Image: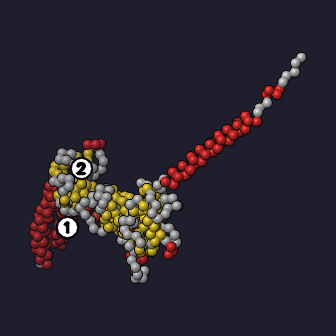
Amino acid sequence: MPTADLSSLKIHDSARSKSVGGKVLRIFSASLGVLIIVLGGILAFHKQTPAVEVAAALPANDPQAETLLNASGYVTPRRRATVAAKITGRVTGVFFDEGMNVREGQLLATLDDSDARRALNAAIADRNASQAAIADLEVQLKYAMIQLHRAQELFAQKVQSQEALDTAGTNVDSLKAKILLAKDQVTASEARVLEAQQGVDNCIIHAPFSGVVVSKDAQVGEMVSPISAGGGFTRTGIATIVDMNSNEIEVDVNEAYIARVYPGQEVMATLDAYPDWRIPSHVRTIIPTADRDKGTVKVRISFDKLDPKILPDMGVKVAFLSEKDSVKKAKPQGPTARAIIPQAAVRGVGAGSYVFAVRDGKIERRTVTLGRTVSHNIEVMGGINPGDELVVRGPGNLQDGMKVEIRQ
């Protein structure tokens, strides 16, 4: 049997070296490609413009910078009244309209007073009858006094008996008692006249105080009543009057921050209807009770100066200001602050404090001199002007002259 020749399967040295060299070349090429990609990514990363958040420096006297606490509420008048009748009746006259200014005691409406006037006339007739009875009794008393005087003279002359004298005296005393009773009846009649007159007066509705009519709640022909009766066919009010001079702000302050509020504290109010109008105000009182459901305490704020544009039930936002006046009095005279900036914009400590300002899309490093701390802000004596945009949040590798992108 022939033997197999395995020498033909041997790989020549030239072929072996050629295969190894190709493999090394492929590995080198792949590594070089990866390195190029990594370097390209690093260069692209370094060329990417960093994004920063900025905040504007505020003027040193800007009330917004002195804010300790913010809250929202509504304009509420202290004097608001829904004027109603004291009796149930039909409206016969309405003498006002919405938006009308009324003065205290001005006639607003009238009710049907026919029944009340009949009662008044009856009371007056009873009083007049009682007064007429007094006049008749006084005439009878005068005649009884004459008879008593005659009986006394005849008794003294022994012409008339004691019984006749006693009868004359009794008549006088009886008439005097009747006159006193008639006078008491007149007094009672006078009281009934006043009561009936009050019933007539109740049919006339007057304004309880000076103000503006904000709601007209009844018309001629409708029934009104001081209590709810008759379903939807009976009105319980005639008009709603508001004293515009008593407008104030009512806000609910979280009980966790109520310690920052005190009577007389300066407040800056902004109406939702006029967001660019800042209204100086002050805390009038803090209601000494908390709402357990909402966890708030009610605070009432008075406007320093009222304006016709301030209307009841308008939404309003208020900023409770810090006690800056006392701080300024206690602080010795020296350099004044030029601006107020957020504490987050300050980098470094002490004399080495600096900020990054953004101007024309580039970073500017500025050394600043700091003053007192106000809430979350800090005063700057120099190095910053009001309106400068300062970096408050951004990467840690910011440098002077670096281009940045402002994040909105």
Residue at point 11%, 70% (across, down): 142
Mark closer to the chain start, 2 or 1: 1
Nearer the viewer's eye, disc 2 or disc 1? Answer: 2
Residue furthest top as drawn: 1
Q: Residues within 10 Å of mark 2 (few under 14, many from 20)?
A: some
- Residue 230 placement: quadrant: top left
Q: Which residue is mark 2?
A: 217
Q: Nearer the viewer, residue 161 or 217?
A: 217
Above or below, 383 relative to 273: below
- Residue drawn at x 16%, y 53% is 95
* Percent position of residue 289, x then y: 44, 63
Percent position of residue 338, x then y: 38, 73
Residue type, numbered disc 2: Asp
Q: Which residue is mark 1?
A: 180
Task: Give how far apart the Cα atoms at labels 2 and 1 are.
Answer: 51 Å
Residue 141 in sight here: yes
**Viewer-closest of 27 and 52:** 27
- Which structural element holds mark 2? loop
Q: In the rendered view, does 35 fall on the left or right side of 370? A: right
**Which quadrant is the C terminus positioned in?**
bottom left
Tell me, yes or no, if residue 378 can be seen here: no
